[in-house]
Image (spheres, grey):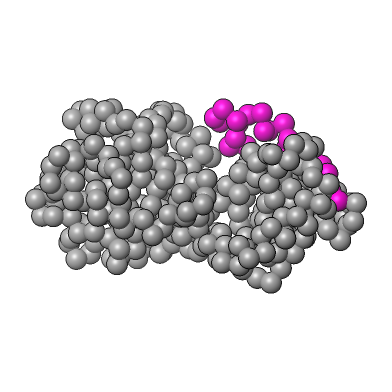
Amino acid sequence: MRSLPKKVVFIKVTNEWYQLIKANYITTGSDMVNIWKAGNVDPEMDKIAQGLEPGELALFIMKYKDGVNYIIGGGFFLSREMYTVKDAWKLFGVRNGVLNYDEFVLRVSDENGDPDNLKSATFRGVFIFSKKESLVVPDELSESFKDCDLLEMSNEDPAGLYLTKIALERRYPQLQSGRSEHDWPGIYLMAAKRIASRMAANFEARVLQAYNFTCCISGCNSFQVLDVAHIKTFFDDSYQDTDNGIVMRCDFHRLFAKGFITAYYKNSDTIVLQVSKSLGIKEAREYLAYDGRELMLPEDRSLWPNRKSLEWHRRVRYENWLRFGDIQPVPIKKMKDA
């Protein structure tokens, strides 16, 4: 391992948080999560949190039913923000560690928090371990978590160095070489990747030709920034069919893959774009202007996007952070015993 962070922050999470984040992680892959605080924050802990620098590592600690604390994952600090509950839900959804918006509102109320001022720390490159992969926290460190939820440790400390090194080594098998983001991509993309490499060039050439080397949304025909996006990213026989591909400028492809945009048949002759309103919360408002735009499609209608594949993308991938796709978390009533 080339280098390690200079320090690591340990954050205590609940079993419920773990189950919800894990379910979303398995389905849709590594992404940003939001760890929030609604009520008063312990001054000492707030001081540590204020000292976090972008890119610093946080390891998430949870106590299993055996009474032992485990490191169940981690992430890299991105930013500290103040959100309204409504905006935090639109941006992160279940990645706030709550099942739905109504529960989110209730949780904030239970903590006597202000729904218009939610203290949030966002982490990206998040990784989650299974029970088997989880790392036992030494007793001396576990003792420190009796009275606090957040603890900072320098990697000059042997325990901090050991836990950081082992946790990142256990993350390593989840990393995907050759990707712009070296993270776990989720079960759909992983399953699709197994059959993509052998016929990728053939598939991309067919789709690019069908769309006359033009982005179906913007009309951009600069080859250097054009991508071929798979609509249904799953391992069935139609995965490499031309009608399961669509040409997009690289920024639109990223939004499509992340679930911020989708498309649907408005009628038999028209396919239009749908854009998540969450893009209007941060600095991505320019994409809202594309909402409802008619896609530019191949002359050969047999090469148009497959209707069922588009329906799948709209149902499963679009705004996927607001739900759990085809994998449901452990029922809340069972979480306490997990």
Number of numbered discs overlaid on the protein picture: 0
Q: Residue at x 72, y 31 (%)?
A: 289
- Measured as percent of width and height from the top left, residue 240 is found at 70, 64
- Measured as percent of width and height from the top left, residue 100 is found at 48, 49
Where residue 83 sits, quadrant-wise, is: top left
Q: Which residues are magenta?
A: 277-298
Q: Residue at x 63, y 65 (%)?
A: 198
Given residues 150 and 135, the one toward you in this image is 135
Any magenta on residue 93? Answer: no
Q: Residue at x 77, y 50 (%)?
A: 208
User: Is 281 drawn above or below residue 13 in the view shown?
Assistant: above
Q: Is residue 149 left or right of residue 111?
A: left
Q: Residue at x 19, y 46 (%)?
A: 161
Any magenta on residue 280? Answer: yes
Specify whether residue 106 is in view.
no
- Measured as percent of width and height from the top left, residue 143 is found at 10, 49
Q: Is residue 114 left or right of residue 250?
A: left
- Measured as percent of width and height from the top left, residue 311 is found at 71, 58
User: Is 300 drawn above or below residue 254 in the view shown?
Assistant: below
Given residues 3 and 28, the one toward you in this image is 3
Given residues 117 and 46, the one toward you in this image is 46
Q: Quadrant of the C terminus?
A: bottom left
User: Is 21 drawn above or below residue 33 in the view shown?
Assistant: below
